[in-house]
Amino acid sequence: MGLDTYAYHGDRDEMMDDALFAHLPVGVASIGIFSAGSNSFRGKTYAGFMSASVGVDLYREEIPAAEVRGIAHALQDWVAERSNEGIADAAAAGELGGYPIPPAEVRWLAEWFAVVAQHNGRVIGWY
């Protein structure tokens, strides 16, 4: 089943502006069929990784702002504890579930969630 994952404002039913994510490298993360820019990504690609690494199920209609903040911290901690080789080794060993996720994409995800958390955003899943 497909999944697109979007950054939404916490206090209104509106996607976060792409400009908030402008510092993220373009073309690193997998974008979804209806993902317009850096304020969204193809959640299906990363669902296994998110579940295995920080215990989060992306297949939900909404992840509230408070939980997004916890996810952002958990991802940043997970990345900080590993080198590029450590991330790649975990992916190659199948420890991260689903698709093999290169270190650059893991770091992109960690930063994406940090931006959403910093702006008190929530995450919307469309599947």
Image (cartoon, rainbow, N blue to C red):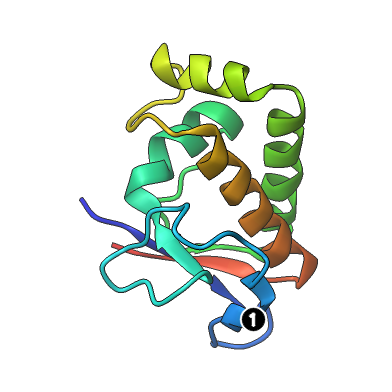
Please name the residue shown 76% across and 30% down the image: 80
**Percent position (x, y) of residue 121?**
67, 71
Residue 123 is left or right of residue 78, and the answer is: left
Q: Percent from the top left, x then y, of residue 51?
A: 48, 34
Which residue shows up at 71% across the image and 64% down it? 115
Relative image position of residue 119 (x, y in whole percent) = 76, 72
Placement of 20 over or under 3, stated as above or below: below
Which of 107 and 10 lies nearest the eye of the viewer? 107
Vertical position of residue 56 compared to residue 111: above or below: above
- Counting every numbered tag in the picture gives 1
Q: Single out the residue that lies furthest toward the left.
A: 1
| Res. 32 visible in picture | yes
Kindly tell me whether residue 61 is visible in this rendering: no
Element under disc 1: helix
Residue 109, horizontal then vertical, whole percent: 57, 49
Between 101 and 78, the one nearer to me in the picture: 101
Determine which residue is flagged by label 1: 19
Q: Is residue 86 above or below residue 63?
A: above
Q: Is residue 97 left or right of residue 64?
A: left
Q: Residues within 10 Å of mark 1 (few under 14, many from 20)?
A: few
Inspect the image, locate mark 1, and give the three-letter code of the amino acid beneath it.
Ala
Question: For this view, does 104 lie left or right of residue 99?
Answer: right
Which residue sits at x=42%, y=43%?
A: 46
Name the residue rendered at 45%, 50% in the picture: 58
